[in-house]
Each structure stands twice: as structure tokens, then as C-alpha cells.
Image: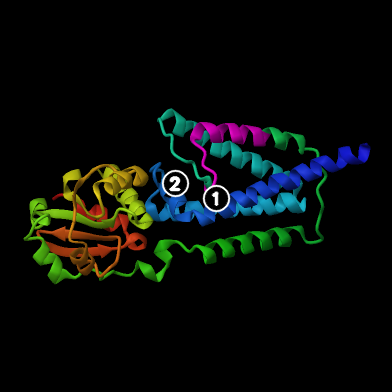
Amino acid sequence: MKKIKDILPIVLKVVLGVVFIVSAIFKIIDMDQFEIYIYSYHFFSLNFSFLVARAAIIAELVLGIGLVSNCFHKLMWWGSVAMLMGYTLLLIYAQLIGRTDNCHCFGDVLQFNPWQSIIKNLVLMGLFALIYKVKGKRFRNDLLALAGVVFASSLAVFVVSPPDNFTSAYKPQQNLNVELFDAAMQQMPLEDLHLNEGKKIVCFFSTACDYCQMSAHKLSLMQQFADFPADDICYVFMGTEDGKKHFYEASQSLTYRDVIYEDVVGLLKITNGVFPVIVLMDNGTIVHEYEFRSMKEKEIREFMEKS
């Protein structure tokens, strides 16, 4: 009986470690959404949110591996409890400001709203209280082993999912057929948007495209944070009215001026079959062009600043 009593806390510790590792893996799978979720609080810029997201995942991996291996017990215990407390404080803040969206603690695989995730974290902290007195193992070179785990976890995260601003995709895009687009601006349905007047952000989206939805979410957050005119953003959709309604719900984007481009073949020619395409226009002239991974918050905000 005494043996079982000694083994159960060790088993529980391994289970908690696996929970941390699984949580980290699910966040990596859902990295694009996790980045946007962090950015949505406006504590950090978009580029810095990329790094914060990966730092959180690396910390979870290191803590999970440490718990499973039963090494550095006190350090891993306090680190795990501190992380859970930090997440819980963020979730309490989310609850207070009325957010009900998925907190991405297990990516998109297991969805929890802030209240549900707070309860989950409190349960986990209660379980951690049961393993406080577990005796951990020691390696001959403890610090070297810890440094190795941190390095390996960091390398794995950045190799599997490098930040968008670290990749070659961050180079200027040239997907739009400018000649066809210029002609389309003089015809319906684009003619009513007056895209050649002043500064405009024109987004070509497919209503069924996940990356289009995430691009819309990013841009909507930028517009709210920078407070540039909503009327200067225009969405050009390939899809249906029902698809457009679903797009706004799924993307969590504010509603902007939009049109459904019914000439699908013509629209595909304008974008060269690529979605999303986001262009910054100044009096009808294209100044910058982006796709999902190449969107530059600073560049967009500076462009939209009014003199």
C-alpha cells in the first residue's frame, strides 16, 4: 500500500507533464491563430506577438519535459504553477472585458472560453498541490541537461513554425494583375467603391479560405488599434452572401465596405488565382501588396496615417 502511495504522485506528475507537452504541440499546430490571439490583447505589436507565442510554447515544452523526466522538481513545479497563474490572470482579464472566444490553450483541437479555461487551470493547480513533495531525480550535469532541453525545444519550435517576419515569404508580393485590376475599378461592382480616391486598403478574399479569414482578423485588429477610418477598408469577396456572413463570423472581423465579385473567372485572373491578396492604394496607385504571412503592421499603420 505504501508503494502505491509513493508511486501515484509520480504518475500524476507524468500526466501533468504530458498535458503541458500536448498543450504546446496543439498550439504549434494552431500557431497562426495563437499568434493572432496574443496580438488581439494589444499588449504587443504583431511582430513581437510572434515571439511571445513561441516563448510561451517553449516554456510549456521545457516544463512538460521536466515534469515527465522528474528532474529539477522544485524549479519545474514553481514554473508550472507560475505559468498557470499567469494564464489565469490573463483569462480573468478576458472575462472582465467580455471576451468569450477560444483561449487557444489547446489550440483549436479543444476549445475553451475564458471561464472554462479558468476552471481548468484551477483544477490543474489543485493537482500540482498533490505533487509538491515528490522527490525529483538529479543528473550529474543538471544545468547542462536543462540548457540542452531549452535549446532543443527552442530549435524545434522555430524550425517547425518560424515567425512570418523571419521567412522569405516576407518579401514584397506581386500576385495582382494590375492591368486587369485597373480596368475592373472602372466597372461594377468595384466602381461604387471609389478605390481611386484617397488611401484605401483593398482585400481580395475567398469566403471559404482560412488564411483569408485570419488576414481579415489581423487587419481588423490593426484598424481598431490604430484607429484609421473603417471606410478606407474594402473587402472584395469570391463567394456567396451566406459565405460572406460566415466569413465575418469566423474571422471575427468588423464589417467593412464589401462587394461580392460574381465574375469568378475574372476575379481569379485579377489575383492570379491567389487568395488572400491585400493591397494598399493611394489615389488608385498600388503602393504595397501582401498575402497573409507578409502583412506588415508598421507599414500599414504608417501608410494609413493622415497628414
Counting from the top left corner in percent of width and height, residue 16 is at 70, 44
Circle 2: element type: helix
Q: Nearer the viewer, residue 238 or 151?
A: 238
| Marker disc for residue 56 | 1
89 with respect to 98 (left or right): right
Q: Residue at x 24, y 64 (%)?
A: 289
Q: Are marks 2 and 1 in contact (CB under 8 Å)?
A: yes
Q: Which residues are magenta?
A: 108-125
Q: Residues within 10 Å of mark 1 (few under 14, many from 20)?
A: few
Q: Earlier in the sequence, mark 2 or mark 1?
A: 2
Q: Residue at x 53, y 67 (%)?
A: 159
Label 2, label 1: how far apart the Cα atoms are: 10 Å
The residue indicated by pointer 2 is 38
Q: Is residue 12 magenta?
A: no
Q: Is residue 112 magenta?
A: yes
Counting from the top left corner in percent of width and height, residue 51 is at 47, 55
Circle 1: element type: helix
